[in-house]
Image (cartoon, rainbow, N blue to C red):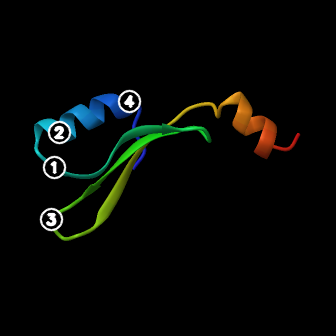
Amino acid sequence: MKVEDADTAFAGAKSKSLNIVLELRSDDWGQRHFCIQDPNGVYLDIVQSFEPTEEYQRDYVSE
């Protein structure tokens, strides 16, 4: 699920005591995200996109 602000979504998930299975983190390829598991066992990845780091782009993005 894409969100505009992963930090706000994460704070909301914590305040509602949702089952967080992956803590909030930022990845070099341009995602800030966390994962929750719903009561039916379905995993949801909550994602905010941003520009990949320069290191990632240098190593993986072709021009």
> Label 2 is placed on what type of residue?
Lys
Can residue 49 be seen here? The reply is yes
Callout 4: 10 Å neighbours few (<14), some, many (20+)?
some
Label 3 SS: loop
Q: Is residue 48 visible?
A: no
Query: Which residue corresponds to mark 3?
Result: 39
Q: Amino acid at mark 3?
A: Pro
Q: Position of residue 28 (x, y in %)?
A: 60, 38
Q: Residue at x 20, y 41 (%)?
A: 13
Q: Depth check: give the residue in front, 21 or 47.
A: 21
Residue lying at 15% horizontally and 65% vertically, measured from the top left: 39
Measure the alpha-carbon separation of dots 2 and 1.
6 Å
What kind of element bears circle 4? loop
Residue depicted at 72% across the width and 29% down the height: 54
Q: CA distance from mark 2 to mark 4?
A: 15 Å
Residue at which label 1 appears: 18
Q: Earlier in the sequence, mark 1 or mark 3?
A: 1
Q: Locate residue 63 relative to residue 34 in the image: left or right.
A: right
Three-letter amino acid code at the position of disc 4: Asp
Mark 4 highlights which residue?
5
Position of the C terminus, as image quadrant, is: top right
Quadrant housing residue 55: top right
Residue type at mark 1 is Leu
Image disc number at residue 14: 2
Gap in Å between the C-alphas at discs 1 and 3? 9 Å
